[in-house]
Amino acid sequence: MLPSGCHTPNVHKYAKNALARAVNLLRELGDEAYSPAAHLARTGSGQNRKDVCPEKYLGTSADYPWFEKGRVLTNCTNAPPFPSVISILLNGFDYVDDSQIVLVLREIYATYPRLTVQLAVAKKVVIPEEVKLDIHQHILGKNSASNDVWNGLVEKATTDYVLVGRRIERFQWYALLERLVRVVSELGVDAVGGALRTPDGHWSMGCQQTRLRNYTLTYRDGYHMSSNSCAYCDYISSPFVSRTSTLRVVKFKMASPETVFRDYFLRLHRDRKSIMSCPDAMFYVLANNETALSLHKQWIPLIQTYVLNEVNLADNRKMSFSCTEAKSSCVSKAGVIQPVCCVKVLAKAVIDVMDICTNLGVFCHLDGGTQLGAIKFNGILPWEADADLSYVVRQNVSFWDHREQFTKLGYALELMSPGNKCRRFDPNNKHCNHFLVAVPGWRFELWGASPKDITDFQDKHHLQATKVYFGGRWLNANISPGLTSRNRYGYEVLRHAEHWRTLRGKSSWMVYKPASFLKCPRPELATVVELTAWDSSVMRLMAKKALKHTLDILEESHIETPHNLLHIMRKPSTETQKPVPIDVCPEKLVTTNPDYSWFTNRPVLTDCTNARPFQTVLSILLNGFDYTNENQIILILRDISVAYPRLTVHLAVPEKIIIPVVLKLTILQHIFRKKQAANDVWNGLVGMATTDYVLVGRRIERFQWYALLERLVRVVSELGVDAVGGALRTPDGHWSMGCQQTRLRNYTLTYRDGYHVSSNSCAYCDYISSPFVSRTSTLRVVKFKMASPETVFHDYFLRLKRERKSVMSCPDAMFYGFANKETALSLHKQWIPLIQTYVLNEVNLANNRKMSFSCTEAMSSCLSKAGVIQPVCCINILTNAVVDILDICTNLHIFCHLDTGTLVGAIKFHGILPWEVDAALSYVVPQNTSFWDHREQFTKLGYELKIMNDDCRRFDPNNKICNDLLVAVPGWTIEMWGSTPKDITRFPRRHHLQATKLFFGGRWLTVNISPGLTSRNRYGYEVLRHAEHWRTLRGNDSWAVYKPASFLKCPRPGQHYCLDQYTADGNLGFMDG
């Protein structure tokens, strides 16, 4: 947190120190013993004795076309017999009857006949004689807690390693236990699992990352880093292998079968133990048929242990827990965020009371810290102690007479009556019209204001109250909420300070002094409530590898949030620090506010002699093409003449308009063609300006002194900012800060409301949606370029960001802007030139509007280029084509499945590899039908079916080289490799009448039996890391051993579509992109 009242040089110092601390942290993390080599050294592995013999890779073409047996164990003399290395733990309570247990035991015997099984059951299971496993049955009570069951089994184990066989449905050699033991042994991993396959055939890697923050536990599928073709994870959902000694130290603690492993892996993660999933190993697991209610109940003990209110599971299930269930207290504590459930209770109560106001016809609005929370967070401040509302006291109606409306909601209305001076409500007594509303866990204040305090309120609101977004609703606020908050609280109001009671202040009237948050009373929970990405063992593993790469991205691409720090590190010129003369007199902030309770007094300028007259400093630019008729323009000019009568206005119009004589403004009209491009109009107006500063008056509906032009000029002048805007109020009263951050990555431009850093109560932004003040010289250098009025400013601010210019929004200044009534189709068309300029396919606006553009609109080529990600539109075309062809297979009853690189893409990204060149499918050639006989099914989708081999004049199901096909798709080709029926004789049996399916392009599509195993055997080593296509790398053919490394250098460094902005490992970086 920046010190209170610091000026730009101190901000620079803060930014530099923050960046230096981040770099030092990266270096420290990189030096820590969290690499595979360090794990190896820590475990003492690498000695002559091995736990499992090494494996030998047979090459990329071994066991074609299924690639299941691509590796074999070597003969070695320094490894003990496998049955003395590992045993299997099975929890019989996972099964509904003994027959399921017997089936699993029978399959273990068929696969690993000499292993020992430790089996927990409620009563002894009768084992068939032919199952000659070494099975130790342990009889436990029917209601035994899961942690007791698993801890008991661990204690019974006599081997160094165990497989914790959670929820195993069937057991096949695909589990590759030797492989998993080798990973634990050689990489020093504390738990390693594999992929899992459910009874309906759905396959997943079983690797998830977790985040514990702000009372919320979130799980997410994916990985950041891999080693030995295994992914580093925070949580694994499959059975897993671990050292027995590890399980005896880090015991299971939770009684519920649903949470016993969730808790276990959270504690492993907290203790910075390493966890992996090797997706070439695969387990068949039971489906979870628990009801939502049952699952909810089972989670409660974990919720209470970790002080949580919400859980977001990787399958998009969300669970919320009440304060009662979570045993959360809503008493405000220093250094502690309020529980989510408490914040929800208070936010709902505020909305409920505002609804009561509406029902009774009483004007109420958010006030104090509650309004400040709406400005910053669109809701309650996370460290709030109460809430504040104000209302206008009416003579003919009162809350007191309608107390039952509060009571039926579970609230109690009480007179605030300081010192018990008020025994009853009295609308004529200022001290006796304030209320307290008692809400479960909270009390909040309802302040009464006399009608005379609001005489000019409706006029200033133009018959429509200003509204701020709060808790999902638009609620009444002060006329200019940002101004109110700055006047009410003083300096640096966009920075944060805990509640005055928490800070032990004398009253709420103390000057707001933002600083660092107070120390958390339970630092051990910091890993829960304040967890950062750097607390993750995965991120530690990545730190050393990614340090230089990350800093290069920040420096060259300038695409991540730290650009705000880079902005404020850029020192303004000497004349900006010590302007002589100054452009605007300083303001004097009146902290004991005379304008209670609206706090909308105009800032007071101090008397100074070294400032020029304001009309020589700034002029206003207005684009008359923004308006539908002259009356709108004249109304705005009339408003300007009242607020700033001596300023010059430069007005662009298609023809001269008649200005009323009463408007004694200096108005210079500039005639432009009727269809003049927006950039030409604005650049022309800038060229006409003779002042050092201009207000770019984009889409102004009305103009009031709330624009605070002196304040905006002062910010540009003193902070060296290149553009500064204010809050924006639409005709329906909706108020927003007008500050957005942008992200250009992977052909997608994303806008997001909010800010990371502020100074002088102004937020640093990438894009501002309001009119803005800028130096005229800046606008003459960085000109407007886009012709469309919709995108001319989007492009302008993107270029300012690219050139590392600084942009701010000061929400105490407010502009009245008119709504954009363009149709979705019209807006889409206006965005196309910008899309083509920035090589984009998608735009995500801050108002949740999303626009997608076709390859034709974006002029995108699907031709693969080295070092470049494929355009999103191209990926979508190929994805849809693969799904279409699999549907044709289903319609024709031909067995097809994803293959080679397309299969790898499905494993890593649930879709096409971002650097793909083509797609590959395999199919079983049927004797009674063929794709060739149904070519029209491809043709009607816009695809063309061809025979791959030029030597084949016709399709021949009996000739292997004449049943391979090519599908021509716009911009792509898809290979379809035919297999003879004899190649698939083992396939249905191993699939148990249900093919394995992988999630691809939003659908579950058929794949090989164990897709992770197939991919590792097909491509060789480190298959979870990335390498560009063999053609891009100029390889001889696709049978070369996969050699992942850094991505090739981008032909246009720093662009959002460059592959080298990513590490060549993990999938989450791409998914976040």
Image (cartoon, helix red, strand yellow):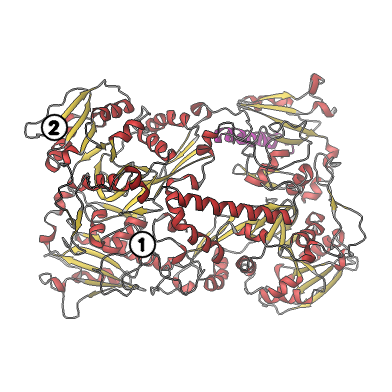
Q: What residue is drawn where x is 40% and y is 31%?
A: 293
Residue 601 position in % (x across, y down): 84, 47
Position of residue 548 relative to residue 154, above or below, is: below
Task: Determine the residue positioned at 17% across, 37% down.
Answer: 84
Q: Residue furthest left?
A: 130
User: What is the span of residues highlighted in magenta in the rendered image?
Assistant: 339-365
Q: Which residue is mark 2?
A: 134
Residue 324 falls left or right of residue 127: right
Looking at the rendered structure, the kind of residue marked 1 is His
Element assignment for label 2: strand
Q: Residue furthest front?
A: 48
**Which residue is drawn at the image coordinates 75% and 74% (left, top)?**
686
> What number of labels is visible?
2
Closer to the chain start, of discs 2 and 1, is: 2
Label 2 Cα neighbours within 10 Å, binned few <14 / some 14-19 / many ≥20: some
Q: Nearer the viewer, residue 659 or 593?
A: 593
Question: How far is mark 2 from mark 1, CA to CA?
Answer: 43 Å
- Give the residue type at disc 2: Asp
Nearer the observer, 144 or 1046: 1046
Q: Is residue 923 magenta?
A: no
- Residue 630, can we see it? no
Residue 1036 quadrant: bottom left
User: Which quarter of the figure has residue 430?
Assistant: top right
Q: x, y (%) of residue 801?
A: 62, 65
Q: Is residue 498 left or right of residue 604?
A: left
Q: Which residue is mark 1?
A: 1026
Instruction: Check disc 1: other Cα within 10 Å, few if <14, some if 14-19, many if 20+.
Output: many
Coordinates of residue 1069 in the picture (x, y in percent): 44, 56
Dominant secondary structure (helix, strand or loop) of the stretch shown in magenta: helix
- Residue 798 visible in image: yes
